[in-house]
Image: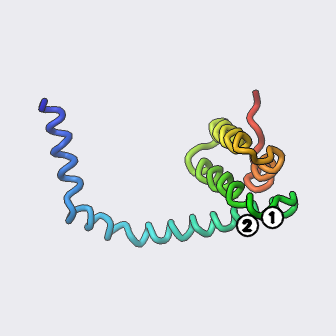
Amino acid sequence: MNSNALKRVQKWQVKTEPERVCERLRALRAEMVKNTGLMQELLVEIETRVRQVLNEAGVVTILYPFYLNFGREVFARRLRFAGQSLLIEVDVLLEKWVRRSLDRQVLERIRDEVFTLTEPAE
């Protein structure tokens, strides 16, 4: 093994020592629990708003999980992207779910009304 690879393995071994990992997690746990709680509250709010759009659009309940998954994916993208990059990512998601036979207009309403995003400029 070359020295660079050996150094990487040694660093990995040090940072993954069970005692060290446990110590790090103990120090971060309170903040992690707080952040998880906040994210779950936001996600529940988003899901409720998606359900409102679905109710208004007359979507059959058997399709709700798929539309909710679209909403969750958009929510996750909002945490990672912004601006034009976010709009492009959401457009890709929208096309994915349209290809899976969901209604484009309902997906666009979720995008626009729940997340207040608009489609990217061409």
Spot occupied by residue 85 in the image (x, y as percentages of width and height):
63, 37
Quadrant of the drawing holding the C terminus = top right
CB atoms of marks 1 and 2 within 8 Å? yes
Residue occupying image coordinates x 65% and y 50%: 74
Residue occupying image coordinates x 37% and y 66%: 28
* Relative height, residue 52 to residue 8 (above, below): below
> Separation of disc 1 and disc 2 at Cα?
6 Å
Spot occupied by residue 86 in the image (x, y as percentages of width and height):
64, 41
Mark 1 element type: helix
Left or right of 40: which side holds 13?
Answer: left
Left or right of 80: which side holds 46?
Answer: right
Residue marked by disc 2: 48
Spot occupied by residue 103 in the image (x, y as percentages of width and height):
80, 47
Residue occupying image coordinates x 12% and y 32%: 1
Mark 2 element type: helix
Residue occupying image coordinates x 67% and y 51%: 70
Residue neighbourhood size for the residue with mark 2, other residues' Cα within 10 Å, grouped as few (<14), some (14–19), many (≥20): some
Q: Nearer the viewer, residue 118 or 63?
A: 63
Q: Nearer the viewer, residue 95 or 16?
A: 95
The dot on residue 52 is 1
Quadrant of the image occupied by residue 31: bottom left
